Image (cartoon, rainbow, N blue to C red):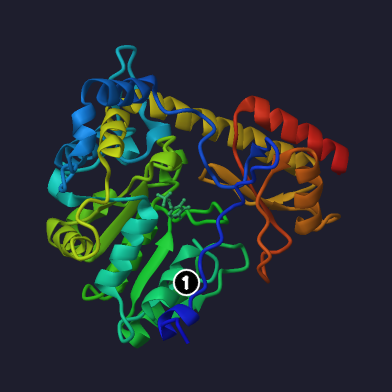
């Protein structure tokens, strides 16, 4: 056998389809329907035109400037873009409920080639075959993939009847086996979130000797960020991404926010795999994005507004829809299966996501697009239902 025993056991992540046969309206991978800020385009053009030699050199291995502006962005927005106050001169202030009671510093930031890669370093750093983790049964489906890749035993806790996290059971199982905890907040694919105070109560009950990871990929669209809790809990790691609210899935940038000690540990792991994960162009575009908080605040607000409109539309059509704090809706209809609905909508040139997973196979997950795209999806659904 030419393959290692490790590789024979792998089961890779299956992303939302990216078809090339036809120009579909893509509402299946939770990408942002809006382009990056004009200042990102300008910065990238400037960089390649005026500094071509920099492409022949290695990038900054520490991404220091990028970490500085990520910290600035979090301090300016409070970590929830859709609720910021944007003044007419473009300055941004966090909403009262989102204010971070300390200054996030660059030493609290670690970046990677998408938050998927950040997560892989985090899983390597904090779990192994004898250090397991607990997660909800339905959450980001990459976590079980890493468990397989790194041979980490995992403990999956079913969601409650109303699709929210079973917080008590997660804590009980974590205590039983001295396990870490990971979940997305707001969660995927449900779109439901815990409040910061609910997460704080979990952290108070969980062991401070075990890692506690909160994936905030969607928090900018209306959840509550746990960044303010970093002051109180040294075992907390928060994962965030440029792929959703920062209109940057193509540039592959993700980051974590934690205390500098844990950031250093993850950096050590990274330096054993690839010293330069963030390429020079991604560093430039990422920096420009973080400096235009007003643009992304407005985009996140647009998406959140459209989401709430579409929630009402689906309700009026007889769907059961979860109240989302994200850029997608998770819904099912009593008279058509999830698989059938997905197929019929695809025939109309629109891609949404259907999971063939027992327990959620009746649902579809719909990414929120532009008002024009959602108008076309409304028309398609009107015809089918
Ligand atoms: C999209 C997503 C990610 C991955 O984002 P990338 O930065 O594009 O790798 C991580 N976690 C959750 C919950 C997501 O939905």
In the rendered view, does 105 fall on the left or right side of 306? Answer: left
Q: Where is residue 122 in the image (x, y as percent from the top left)?
A: 29, 65
Location of residue 183 by image quarter: bottom left
Q: Quadrant of the C terminus?
A: top right
Ligand 1 closer than 8 Å to the CB at disc 1? no
In the rendered view, does 178 fall on the left or right side of 7? Answer: left
Q: Which residue is drawn at 26% across and 32% down?
A: 284
> For mark 1, what is the residue?
144
All told, the count of numbered labels is 1
The answer to whether residue 75 is seen in the rendering is: no
| Front residue (pair 284, 30) | 284
Q: Where is residue 57 in the image (x, y as percent from the top left)?
A: 17, 39
Position of residue 123 relative to residue 82, above or below, is below
Q: Residue at x 36, y 53 (%)?
A: 115
Position of residue 119 relative to residue 330, above or below, is below
Element on which disc 1 rests: helix
The answer to whether residue 178 is seen in the rendering is: yes
Position of residue 47 relative to residue 61, above or below, is above
């Amino acid at each position: 056998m030419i393959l290692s025993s490790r590789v024979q056991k792998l089961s890779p992540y299956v992303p939302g389809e990216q078809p090339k046969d036809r120009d579909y309206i893509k509402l299946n991978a939770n990408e942002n329907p809006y382009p990056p800020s004009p200042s990102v385009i300008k910065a990238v053009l400037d960089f390649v035109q005026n500094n071509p030699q920099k492409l022949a050199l290695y990038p900054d291995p520490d991404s220091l400037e990028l970490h500085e502006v990520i910290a600035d962005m979090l301090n300016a927005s409070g970590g929830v873009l859709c609720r910021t106050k944007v003044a007419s001169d473009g300055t941004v202030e966090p909403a009262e409920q989102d204010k971070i009671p300390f200054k996030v510093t660059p030493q609290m930031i670690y970046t990677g080639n998408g938050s998927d890669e950040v997560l892989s370093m985090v899983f390597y750093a904090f779990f192994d075959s004898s250090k397991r983790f607990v997660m909800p049964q339905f959450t980001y489906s990459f976590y079980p993939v890493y468990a397989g890749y790194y041979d980490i035993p995992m403990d999956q806790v079913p969601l409650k009847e109303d699709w929210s996290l079973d917080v008590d059971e997660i804590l009980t199982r974590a205590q039983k086996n001295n396990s870490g905890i990971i979940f997305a907040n707001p969660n995927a694919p449900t779109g439901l979130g815990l409040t910061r105070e609910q997460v704080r109560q979990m952290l108070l009950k969980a062991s401070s000797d075990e890692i506690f990871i909160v994936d905030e990929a969607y928090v900018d669209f209306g959840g509550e960020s746990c960044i303010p809790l970093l002051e109180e809990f040294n075992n907390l790691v928060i994962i965030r991404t440029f792929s959703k609210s920062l209109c940057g899935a193509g540039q592959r940038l993700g980051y974590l926010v934690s205390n500098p000690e844990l950031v250093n540990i993850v950096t050590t792991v990274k330096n054993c795999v690839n010293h330069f994960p963030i390429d020079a162009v991604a560093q430039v575009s990422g920096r420009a994005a973080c400096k235009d908080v007003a643009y992304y605040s407005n985009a996140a607000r647009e998406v959140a507004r459209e989401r709430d409109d579409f929630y009402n539309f689906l309700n009026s059509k007889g769907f059961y829809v979860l109240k989302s704090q994200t850029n997608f809706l998770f819904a099912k209809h009593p008279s058509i299966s999830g698989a059938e609905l997905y197929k019929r909508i695809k025939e109309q040139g629109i891609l949404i996501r259907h999971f063939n997973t027992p327990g959620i196979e009746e649902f579809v997950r719909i990414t929120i697009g532009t008002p024009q795209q959602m108008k076309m999806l409304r028309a398609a659904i009107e015809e089918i239902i």
